[in-house]
Amino acid sequence: MLTIYQQPITQPDRGERTERTVEAELAAIAAEIAARLDEMESIKLMSGGALVSKFAACRSISPVAFRMTLQLLSGNVLPLLSYADRAAARGVSKQTVYLETKNELERVRHIFPQLVLALEVMRRNALSHEDPTSNADSLRD
Protein backbone atom coordinates (compact mmCIF):
# COMPACT_ATOMS: atom_id res chain seq x y z
CA MET A 1 0.00 0.00 0.00
CA LEU A 2 1.32 3.42 -0.94
CA THR A 3 0.84 6.24 1.55
CA ILE A 4 1.53 9.94 1.76
CA TYR A 5 2.10 11.05 5.34
CA GLN A 6 0.51 7.80 6.52
CA GLN A 7 -2.65 8.38 4.43
CA PRO A 8 -3.30 5.49 2.00
CA ILE A 9 -3.53 6.42 -1.65
CA THR A 10 -3.60 2.86 -3.00
CA GLN A 11 -5.25 -0.33 -1.84
CA PRO A 12 -3.35 -2.65 0.51
CA ASP A 13 -1.23 -5.24 -1.26
CA ARG A 14 -2.84 -8.64 -0.73
CA GLY A 15 -0.26 -10.62 -2.64
CA GLU A 16 -1.71 -10.06 -6.09
CA ARG A 17 0.31 -7.94 -8.49
CA THR A 18 -1.62 -4.82 -9.38
CA GLU A 19 -0.22 -2.10 -11.57
CA ARG A 20 0.22 1.24 -9.94
CA THR A 21 -1.60 4.02 -11.64
CA VAL A 22 0.29 6.90 -13.14
CA GLU A 23 -1.38 9.20 -10.63
CA ALA A 24 -0.25 7.04 -7.72
CA GLU A 25 3.29 6.91 -9.08
CA LEU A 26 3.39 10.69 -9.51
CA ALA A 27 1.95 11.18 -6.03
CA ALA A 28 4.62 8.90 -4.56
CA ILE A 29 7.42 10.78 -6.29
CA ALA A 30 5.97 14.17 -5.34
CA ALA A 31 5.64 13.00 -1.73
CA GLU A 32 9.28 11.89 -1.69
CA ILE A 33 10.43 15.23 -3.07
CA ALA A 34 8.21 17.17 -0.65
CA ALA A 35 9.53 15.18 2.31
CA ARG A 36 13.14 15.93 1.34
CA LEU A 37 12.41 19.65 0.78
CA ASP A 38 10.70 19.77 4.18
CA GLU A 39 13.75 18.07 5.69
CA MET A 40 15.98 20.76 4.14
CA GLU A 41 13.77 23.47 5.61
CA SER A 42 13.80 21.88 9.06
CA ILE A 43 17.58 21.52 9.29
CA LYS A 44 18.13 24.94 7.73
CA LEU A 45 20.55 23.68 5.08
CA MET A 46 19.03 25.71 2.30
CA SER A 47 15.54 26.84 1.59
CA GLY A 48 13.61 24.13 -0.23
CA GLY A 49 12.02 26.89 -2.26
CA ALA A 50 15.45 28.20 -3.26
CA LEU A 51 16.42 24.76 -4.49
CA VAL A 52 13.20 24.43 -6.47
CA SER A 53 13.87 27.88 -7.96
CA LYS A 54 17.37 26.80 -8.98
CA PHE A 55 15.98 23.69 -10.66
CA ALA A 56 13.34 25.76 -12.44
CA ALA A 57 15.98 28.25 -13.62
CA CYS A 58 18.18 25.42 -14.85
CA ARG A 59 15.22 23.91 -16.73
CA SER A 60 14.35 27.22 -18.37
CA ILE A 61 17.96 27.86 -19.44
CA SER A 62 18.48 24.41 -20.91
CA PRO A 63 16.37 21.24 -20.73
CA VAL A 64 19.54 19.27 -21.51
CA ALA A 65 21.43 20.90 -18.64
CA PHE A 66 18.45 20.27 -16.35
CA ARG A 67 18.35 16.56 -17.23
CA MET A 68 22.12 16.29 -16.84
CA THR A 69 21.93 18.00 -13.45
CA LEU A 70 19.25 15.59 -12.26
CA GLN A 71 21.21 12.58 -13.47
CA LEU A 72 24.43 13.76 -11.88
CA LEU A 73 22.82 14.70 -8.57
CA SER A 74 21.19 11.27 -8.40
CA GLY A 75 24.59 9.62 -8.80
CA ASN A 76 24.54 8.82 -12.51
CA VAL A 77 27.91 10.05 -13.80
CA LEU A 78 27.52 8.54 -17.27
CA PRO A 79 26.79 11.94 -18.84
CA LEU A 80 30.32 12.90 -17.83
CA LEU A 81 32.12 9.66 -18.58
CA SER A 82 30.79 8.10 -21.75
CA TYR A 83 31.74 10.56 -24.49
CA ALA A 84 32.77 7.73 -26.84
CA ASP A 85 29.55 5.76 -26.31
CA ARG A 86 27.38 8.85 -26.65
CA ALA A 87 29.26 9.93 -29.78
CA ALA A 88 28.92 6.50 -31.38
CA ALA A 89 25.19 6.36 -30.60
CA ARG A 90 24.63 9.73 -32.27
CA GLY A 91 27.13 9.34 -35.10
CA VAL A 92 29.21 12.37 -34.09
CA SER A 93 32.75 12.80 -32.85
CA LYS A 94 33.81 12.52 -29.22
CA GLN A 95 34.96 16.12 -29.45
CA THR A 96 31.43 17.20 -30.40
CA VAL A 97 29.97 15.42 -27.38
CA TYR A 98 32.70 16.82 -25.14
CA LEU A 99 32.06 20.39 -26.31
CA GLU A 100 28.28 20.01 -25.94
CA THR A 101 28.72 18.64 -22.42
CA LYS A 102 31.15 21.43 -21.55
CA ASN A 103 28.67 24.05 -22.81
CA GLU A 104 25.82 22.51 -20.81
CA LEU A 105 27.96 22.43 -17.66
CA GLU A 106 28.79 26.10 -18.16
CA ARG A 107 25.06 26.81 -18.23
CA VAL A 108 24.63 24.83 -15.01
CA ARG A 109 27.63 26.63 -13.46
CA HIS A 110 25.65 29.91 -13.40
CA ILE A 111 23.01 28.29 -11.19
CA PHE A 112 24.89 25.54 -9.29
CA PRO A 113 28.57 26.60 -9.24
CA GLN A 114 29.43 24.23 -6.38
CA LEU A 115 27.80 21.34 -8.23
CA VAL A 116 29.92 21.86 -11.33
CA LEU A 117 33.10 22.06 -9.25
CA ALA A 118 32.16 18.80 -7.52
CA LEU A 119 31.36 17.17 -10.87
CA GLU A 120 34.74 18.17 -12.27
CA VAL A 121 36.44 16.53 -9.29
CA MET A 122 34.23 13.42 -9.67
CA ARG A 123 35.12 13.17 -13.35
CA ARG A 124 38.85 13.46 -12.67
CA ASN A 125 38.61 10.82 -9.93
CA ALA A 126 36.53 8.47 -12.07
CA LEU A 127 38.89 8.81 -15.02
CA SER A 128 41.96 8.18 -12.86
CA HIS A 129 40.33 4.98 -11.55
CA GLU A 130 39.39 3.86 -15.06
CA ASP A 131 42.91 4.24 -16.43
CA PRO A 132 45.50 2.59 -14.18
CA THR A 133 48.37 4.18 -16.13
CA SER A 134 47.17 7.74 -15.55
CA ASN A 135 48.58 7.92 -12.04
CA ALA A 136 51.87 6.34 -13.08
CA ASP A 137 52.15 8.68 -16.05
CA SER A 138 51.73 11.71 -13.83
CA LEU A 139 54.72 10.59 -11.73
CA ARG A 140 57.06 10.51 -14.72
CA ASP A 141 59.22 13.49 -15.62
Image (cartoon, helix red, strand yellow):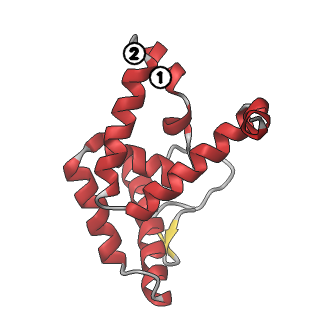
Q: Which of 93 and 54 is in front in this view?
A: 93
Q: Is mark 1 on a helix, strand or loop?
A: helix
Position of residue 66 measured from the top left corner of the image (x, y, whole percent): 33, 48
Above or below residue 100? Residue 110 is below
Looking at the image, the residue that sits furthest to the front is 141
Position of residue 83 measured from the top left corner of the image (x, y, whole percent): 50, 26
Above or below residue 60? Residue 56 is below
Looking at the image, the residue that sits furthest to the top is 91
Q: How crowded is mark 2: few (under 14 residues within 10 Å), some or many (20 or more)?
A: few
Residue identified by numbered label 1? 86
Query: Is any part of residue 17 visible from this angle?
Result: no
Residue 63, picture quadrant = top left
Residue 57, picture quadrant = bottom left
- Do residues under tags 2 and 1 come within 8 Å of each other at their CB atoms? yes
Above or below residue 83? Residue 116 is below
Q: Residues within 10 Å of mark 1 (few under 14, many from 20)?
A: some
Q: Nearer the viewer, residue 119 or 20?
A: 119
Disc marking residue 90:
2
- Say which amino acid is labelled 1: Arg
